[in-house]
Image (tube, rainbow, N blue to C red):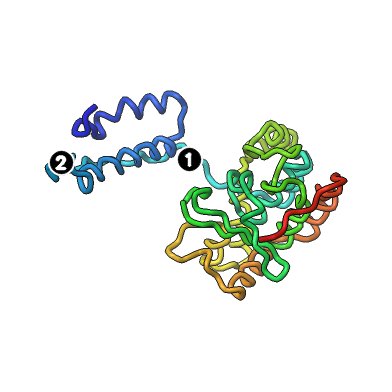
């Protein structure tokens, strides 16, 4: 189709086909945003050899109403204990890290040691924007429970923080995750609910909206990776408001550090 033939009417076949294929409306909207962006560029920035824009005006591309979106579902401590008890050890670590940092699945799976920095004996990670959904560098602050998880996997792999049999993990929503939630009677719980849980616990603990946004990696107008040591200390204290040492400690003591299984090799140096 030529650019001037693309509009909401001509896109209806695409939209209906995607719906028929069972695709979520949010996913369809992502595609429509790409189309809208291209049409806007064609009307406002891209020009031909005669310095004329490709389109006289960009048609209005409307986003669909997300009637099929899922509501957030934070876990209770009891649900967390029940679910984690059935998870394989490598997923236990990742889930505990997620519920104490608010990181997304793909960030945790792709977390690298080279992104770790030492701040007076405490680790923080700075995930480059190309690995983050909102394309903004992601500062990952570790509370006590998350720090214990990191120490338990140190030395397992020279590049990736979380691995399974020495290899990177592609996604947390694996057969192990699905089997665990089924056995726990929590079939509705998704990996992303761990992020919801962290956010809800921060709010319940009275953590400010600005600090919650920074801890959850929400996109803001601020330079969210340019903090003073005092500011990061404040974020660590805020994150520790949701770190239940009794509950988290029991789980961590049941997970030996990966280095205990290795006869040779040394943990990677901190950044």
Secondary structure beneath dot 1 equals: loop
**Percent of width and height locating residue 251:** 80, 50
Crowdedness of circle 2 by 10 Å Cα count: few (<14), some, many (20+)?
Answer: few
- Which residue is identified by label 2? 49
| Quadrant in which the C terminus appears | bottom right
Q: Residue at x 61, y 45 (%)?
A: 110
Q: CA distance from mark 1 to mark 2?
A: 45 Å
**From the viewer's perspective, is residue 214 above or below residue 56?**
below
**Chain-order first, disc 1 or disc 2:** 2
Q: Please state, as top left, top right, bottom left or bottom right, where the N terminus lies in the image.
A: top left
Q: Position of residue 231 (x, y in %)?
A: 58, 73
Is any part of residue 132 visible from this angle?
Answer: yes
Q: Quadrant of residue 63?
A: top left
- Image coordinates of residue 5 in percent, x first then y, are 20, 30
On residue 69, the disc is: 1
Residue sitting at x 71%, y 48%: 158
């Amino acid at each position: 189709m030529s650019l001037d033939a693309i509009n909401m009417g001509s896109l209806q076949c695409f939209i209906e086909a995607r719906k028929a294929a069972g695709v979520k409306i949010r996913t369809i909207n992502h595609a429509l945003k790409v189309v809208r962006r291209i049409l806007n560029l064609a009307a406002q920035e891209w020009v031909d050899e005669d310095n004329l824009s490709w389109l006289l005006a960009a048609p209005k591309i409307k986003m669909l109403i997300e009637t099929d979106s899922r509501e957030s579902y934070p876990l209770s401590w009891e649900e967390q204990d029940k679910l984690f008890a059935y998870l394989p050890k490598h997923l236990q670590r990742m889930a505990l890290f997620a519920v104490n940092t608010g990181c997304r699945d793909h960030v945790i799976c792709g977390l690298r040691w080279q992104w770790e920095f030492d701040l007076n004996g405490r680790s923080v990670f700075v995930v480059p924007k190309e690995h983050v959904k909102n394309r903004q560098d992601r500062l990952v602050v570790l509370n006590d429970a998350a720090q214990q998880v990191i120490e338990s996997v140190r030395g397992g792999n020279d590049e990736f923080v979380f691995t399974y049999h020495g290899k990177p993990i592609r996604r947390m929503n694996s057969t192990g995750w699905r089997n665990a939630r089924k056995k726990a009677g929590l079939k509705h719980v998704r990996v992303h609910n761990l992020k919801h849980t962290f956010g809800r616990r921060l709010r319940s603990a009275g953590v400010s909206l600005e600090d919650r946004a920074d801890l959850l990696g929400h996109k803001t107008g601020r330079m969210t990776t340019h903090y003073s040591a005092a500011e990061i200390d404040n974020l660590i204290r805020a994150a520790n408001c949701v770190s239940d040492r009794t509950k988290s400690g029991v789980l961590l003591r049941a997970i030996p550090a990966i280095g205990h299984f290795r006869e040779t090799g040394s943990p990677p140096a901190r950044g």
